[in-house]
Image (cartoon, grey):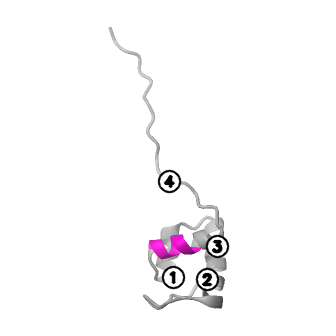
Amino acid sequence: MAELKKGARITGNHRTKLATDLKKKYEKGASIRVLAASTGRSYGFVHRVLCESGAQLRGRGGATKTRTGRAKQA
């Protein structure tokens, strides 16, 4: 994907094509941060374009907190 000029307004057919490309890559597993870095745009911009394209956004990653399940010692 070609890097976009920073701060350039992207509208019309260019935005539609970009949204389609980003959606395909996101649905194949690329993160929003990776897509932002590859296009030279912000996380917020990529997130907004993905939402506009109808992409089903994934939940946040990372480890979840769990209880250890240790029995109380008397």
Q: Which residue is mark 4?
A: 61
Q: Which residue is mark 2?
A: 18
Q: Which residue is mark 1?
A: 39
Alpha carbon separation for disc pair 1 and 2: 10 Å
Q: Is residue 70 above or below residue 40?
A: above
Name which of mark 3 and mark 2 comes first in the sequence.
Answer: 2
Alpha carbon separation for disc pair 3 and 4: 22 Å
Q: Kindly identify the residue that appears in the image at 64 percent across and 61 percent down.
A: 56
Alpha carbon separation for disc pair 2 and 4: 25 Å
The N terminus - image quarter: bottom right
In screen coordinates, is 46 left or right of 72?
Answer: right
Q: Which residue is mark 3?
A: 53
Residue sitting nearer the eye, 54 or 3 = 54
Element assignment for label 3: helix
Boundaries of the magenta span: 43-49
Name which of mark 1 and mark 2 comes first in the sequence.
Answer: 2
The C terminus - image quarter: top left
